[in-house]
Amino acid sequence: MNLSAPRRTAAVAAIALAGLLAGAAAAQPTAAAPAAAQPQAAERAAAAPDIPLANVKAHLSQFGSIAAANGGNRAHGRAGYKASLDYVKAKLDAAGYTTTIQQFTSSGATGYNLIADWPGGDPNQVLMAGAHLDSVTSGAGINDNGSGSAAVLETALAVSRAQLKPTKHLRFGWWGAEELGLVGSRYYVNNLPTAERSKVSGYLNFDMIGSPNPGYFVYDDDPTIEKTFKDFYAGLGVATEIETEGDGRSDHASFKNVGIPVGGLFTGASRTKSAAQAQKWGGTAGQAFDRCYHSSCDSTSNINDTALDRNSDAVAHAVWTLGTEPTVPPGDVYENTADVSIPDNGAAVTSNVAVTGRTGNAPAALKVGVDIKHTWRGDLVVDLLAPDGTAYRLKNSSGNDSADNVIATYTVNASSEAANGDWKLRVQDVAAQDTGYIDSWKLTF
């Protein structure tokens, strides 16, 4: 995980797309027409299998051996990274995946992403799961991020063993040069045509999921994905907390910044575990979740087996749950495409959408699609206002949210609100030195 990104994210020079997307299966069209009817409840696939901890640790052992044979690390531009990628690719090729290596350039060296597509599923709805495969130069990167890479790999292999027939198309990704500023994942997303981006129904990110003094943190980005992970842990009787330490600092940010729903898991990095957290989860209060973060001691001994086992099972649970759920057709769309300027560090502005001709209340899963062009999204507070003035917070301001623009779809439980009336998107810039405007926004009923 890269926790050192500056407030303003520098553009990265990335070149050479190696024919990745030709014929790749992808997902989810933009909602534009009313659905004729709600889908019938479909028979769900079998529950996700238990992911064998021994298999995940065997992958970690391989990553450790690769690092030891290649200067002690698996960093971007080093032989250990390419050897790690070749190891993962060989496993996936043997399991029946269609794999593609994508090349880019960063810091004067060639980098690589690995993409693996499982055959079948709706090509217009793609569920992705991924992890960064590179380490820092100072160590083997077994927790950061061999742990996430190994869990995603073993989940992909479990899909093959089960010969899963998902309703969504499943795609897995291993990203290069994350430690240099999310370079690989950003390159992948930026080179996805807009039509292909719209087909990605969700991206699940796993970065540091075996910390030796672990916490159990869940990303709070997309409500459906968040609930999927929280429900899994509730079933184990394990409490979770919202992930804040790495917010916007791992590969999910590349997807989130272009409006793709994201979620994921994290067990903590250099922050200190509190007494309350130690009482809740065990471990040692007053000590970092991972004392070997970005250090040479991030080796195969720097893993908590219980956390790695639980999180690996959670990865599979999310892939099975979200990948096999019945697909939902688009609903009625109400949209405002008029530009509204947002004053720098000024008063809130609103944009209206008039909803007419409906009966009853708004849905419990009202989709709010937002496209705000802005030079620093961390300054923005965004609310949906119901016709009676009730405010639903879509996005808070955050000093850690260093990307441009807010292009996202939020889900709001608006079932207590009358559907008809004037709905408003309210946006306020709460800090100086930024410019932007509401480009468009829409409600999908």
Image: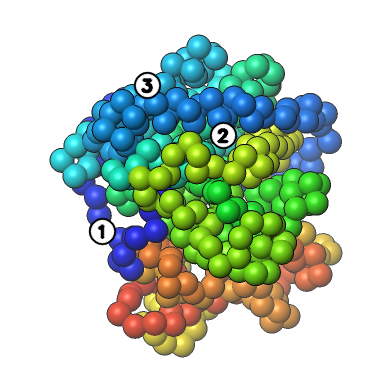
Rounded to the nearest angstrom, the CA distance separating label 3 from label 1 is 30 Å
Q: Amino acid at mark 2?
A: Ala
Which of 110/74 is in front?
74
| Sequence-wise first label, 1 or 2 | 1
Q: Amino acid at mark 3?
A: Asp
The residue tagged 3 is 86
Rounded to the nearest angstrom, the CA distance separating label 2 from label 3 is 17 Å
The residue tagged 1 is 10
Please give the name of the residue rendered at 54% of the width and 49% of the height, measured from the top-left corner.
Answer: 211
SS for callout 2: helix
Q: Is residue 197 above or below residue 220?
A: above
Please give the name of the residue rendered at 34% of the width and 42% of the height, measured from the top-left corner.
Answer: 139
Disc 1 crowd, CA 10 A, few/some/many (<14, 14-19, 20+): few
Circle number at residue 151: 2
Please give the name of the residue rendered at 65% of the width and 49% of the height, measured from the top-left corner.
Answer: 225
Q: Quadrant of residue 136?
A: top left
Rounded to the nearest angstrom, the CA distance separating label 1 from label 2 is 30 Å
Which of pointers 1 and 2 indicates the residue nearer the eye?
2
Image location of residue 81, percent across then percent down: 32, 31
Image location of residue 47, percent across then percent down: 78, 30
